[in-house]
Structures are given as structure tokens and as C-alpha cells.
Image (spheres, grey):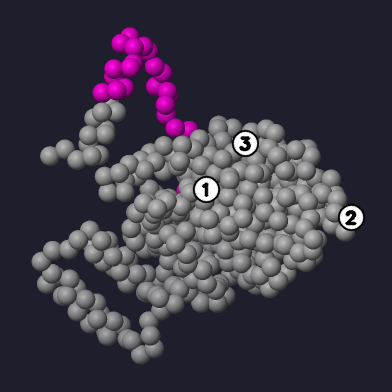
Amino acid sequence: MINRRTAIAALSATAACATRPALAAEPETANQPLLGQAEHVISIWLGGGMGQIDTFDPKAKGDPKAKKPGSYYDAIETAVPDVSVCQHLPLLARQMEQVTAVRSVHHDVIDEHAAATNRMHTGRNISGTVTYPSIGSIIANQRGAVSPDVPPYVLIGYPNVTRGPGFLGSKDSYLYLTETGRGPAGLSRAPGISESRQARRESLLDAVGAGRSQATAKVLDYEAAQQQSLKLSGPEFNRVFQLESEPDQLRYRYGDEFGQRCLLSRRLIERGVRFVEVSHNLNFLNGAGWDVHNEGIEQQHRLIAELDRAVSSLMIDLQSKRLLDKTLIVITTEFGRPPGFDSGGGRGHQGSAFSCVLAGGGLNHKGAWGQTDALSKKIVDNPVSVPDFFATIVSAVGIDPHKNLYDGDRPVPITDQGNPIAALLS
């Protein structure tokens, strides 16, 4: 019996043969994807909407009191000629030779945080028929963990369906924790559960499974995830969460809780985790997080400085361990901010032009890619769609962005017709 997947493949091959000239000579590299050699991704999520005009795409200074559009802060030069950043990013400014601020990312989601968060995690619009996997789950599915003793995907932040595996199933989901002071609660044995008692419980669980005559794919998928959780609950993997084993000077350099999350991400990829998302959601710093409407913008510089300290420390730390070229650092957010100010002196939402950042990963970095107009409102050169940005990330870790995943028999390309930024991969 021919299923849908087989039929599609056969029809595609027939069509290709029919349309190709019989004697056409094609180079061996034709249609070959441009792939990088990074092994890990650390994805830093700035929930709320980082203002590109106040961080990585500064313009002439504005004035919120006079309602004059423009940047909230002064700009400073970086290690890359003609590339400037906000004055509160001095540490990253020195490292911009290993960074590319992609200033021309865009999508059409403006006023809905949840929808934009979904777009920036799955690369697609919300669908009524398909639950698309997050980029973390896609990379987990395609590359797996480097070591069988660790999960492929860890989320340091609050769980959400947008971070999940979608149709890929629970085996490609994440392990999560919400604070660095302890490991994932779900992997910690309850007090009084000894090794022997745990072994008896696992034996009973195995007996229940063995007595079942058959199981659906979903049950088998769940049981595989369950077995992985049991394996990860031991002391060996849980040592990765013991940040107190790091030198005090290094921990201080990273900074407070967000910095400690970044330090933990380095420890996780050292152990073989493939993809780590680190959420920067410590809203108490300015009362609003990155969603700087009204007076929330007045303390935005504290968020920017914390980001600067932690990410620059992460880059230096990875470099010292010869892991920076193997680890792609990604900074994303749901959308950007317009150049004008609202009635309270803050900023609204802007999806038509905003910045995301790539660092390390062995890319051919440019300092900046793409260009916006004088107010960072419109893209004037090298636009990068969300699928294009996703294609760049997956290509950097050796995954063909045009490859199909399958929701049952339905083919679903890894990206929604995205093409990577070739200049960063050449």
C-alpha cells in the first residue's frame, strides 16, 4: 500500500525528471544547502518586545517630553567600523566582531504578545489544524543531544506551548526549570525515597508496561519521555545545576539571576545539551520588563545593562573553553518598538522592523546586517523575514531549512520557505 508520503516523493521525482533537460550538466553543489558547523544553540528570549532603536539599532536621539521621535539613549561605537549600539551595551560593543545584529527582521504581528511570541518560537502563524513545533524542538528532533545522558532541549524559564514540540511529540519537548537555585523539580526524588525504593518503583512500572498487549504511538512516545526523565533524575545529571561549584569571581562577573541562567546554559551545553532557551523575564528591574509602555521605559537601561553584562560574560566564558565557535547565541524578542513615544513617554509595538542578534556559532559575523531608515521604522536594505532568520539558525547547526518534517503523512518544511542569510554562512 502506498501512503501519502511515498506518493508525494514519487510524484516529485517524476516531475523533476520531466522538467530537467536531458543533457543539462549540473554542478555537484547545485541545490546543496549552505550549512554551518555549530553544535549547540543558546537562545535568549527577551519577553515583552526589546526596542531595537534603544539597543542594537540606535538612531538620532529623541525627546519623549517634546514627543520628538528617536533613540532614548546616546549611541557608542563598537569594534566594527560604522556599527554603533546603545550606550548601555559597552561590553558587547567590544565584542561585535563576533556578533551580528540583524536589524531588518520583520513580521505582521503587532498588538498581540502571545501571537508574536508564537511566531518568534515556531516561525509560523498560529494554525487551527497544525500545532507547529518550536525551533528548540526542531533542533532537538534533528540533532538530538550530544550525550545520551542529557536531554537535547532545556528551557530556563516558564513552560509554554509555544516552546513545545507540537506535532513532533513529547520526546522532542523540553526539560524546564524556573530558577537556578535548584534543578528541575520534576527530577528531584521526594524525601525518603532511597535508591532501593526507587528501583522497586521502576521495576513495577516496567511490569505494567510489559503486561500491555499493544500501545499507540502516543503512548510509546510518552513512555520514551518517561524513561528519559527517570534516567535524568540521578545525581550525575543533576550536578550540572550546582552553580556553587563555579569560581565566585566567575559567578560575580555574570551578575544576578539572569546572569546565573546564562552561566547554567554554558554548563548545560558542556554536558551535551543541544538547545537551551534562557528567558530574561525579571520584570521587577523596571516594573514592566521589555514591554516599555509609559513610565516602564524610565528604567529600561537596567535591563539593557543586565543583558550586556550577562551575554558578554557568556561569550568570554565560552571562548575560554573553546566553545564559542561551536555555540550559536541567539537573542530574540516578539517585536520591536516604534521611534515615537506614547502619552506616558514609553513606546508601543512595532513588527515591521526590529532587531534580533546572532553571536558566535562559527558564523562570518558582520557586526550588523540589514538596514533601517533614519528612525528605525522601515527596512531599506536586506530584509529578513522570521522564516529567513530561522533558516539561518538551523543552517548554522547543520540542518537543511528546506527539509520536511511530517505531521502524520503530511509534509511540513522545517521553515516556512525561509532562506538563510548566506553572507553569514559563507
Amino acid carrying mark 2 in the image? Ala
- What stretch of residues is rendered in magenta? 14-39
| In the rendered image, the vertical position of residue 12 relative to residue 241, given as above or below | above
User: Horizontal placement of 238 versus 22: left or right?
Assistant: right
In which image quadrant can residue 59 be found? top right
Q: Earlier in the sequence, mark 3 or mark 1?
A: 1
Percent across and percent down for residue 47 are 60, 61
- Which residue lies at the image location 49% right of the left edge and 38% below the top edge? 418
| In the rendered image, the vertical position of residue 396 relative to residue 91, given as above or below | above
- Which residue lies at the image location 45% right of the left edge and 42% below the top edge? 415
- Residue sitting nearer the eye, 31 or 124: 124
Mark 2: secondary structure: loop
Q: Earlier in the sequence, mark 3 or mark 2?
A: 2
Amino acid carrying mark 1 in the image? Lys
Mark 1: secondary structure: loop
In which image quadrant can residue 378 be found? top right
Percent across and percent down for residue 21 are 34, 12
Whole-angstrom CA distance, mark 3 to mark 2, is: 31 Å
Residue identified by numbered label 3: 383
Percent across and percent down for residue 341 are 79, 55
* Residue projecting furthest to the top: 23
Q: Is residue 29 magenta?
A: yes
Residue identified by numbered label 2: 66
Whole-angstrom CA distance, mark 2 to mark 1, is: 47 Å
Q: Is residue 121 magenta?
A: no
> In the image, which disc is placed on residue 295?
none
Mark 3: secondary structure: loop
Residue identified by numbered label 1: 326
Closer mark to the observer between disc 2 and disc 1: 2
- Which residue lies at the image location 27% right of the left edge and 84% below the top edge? 196
Q: Earlier in the sequence, mark 2 or mark 1?
A: 2
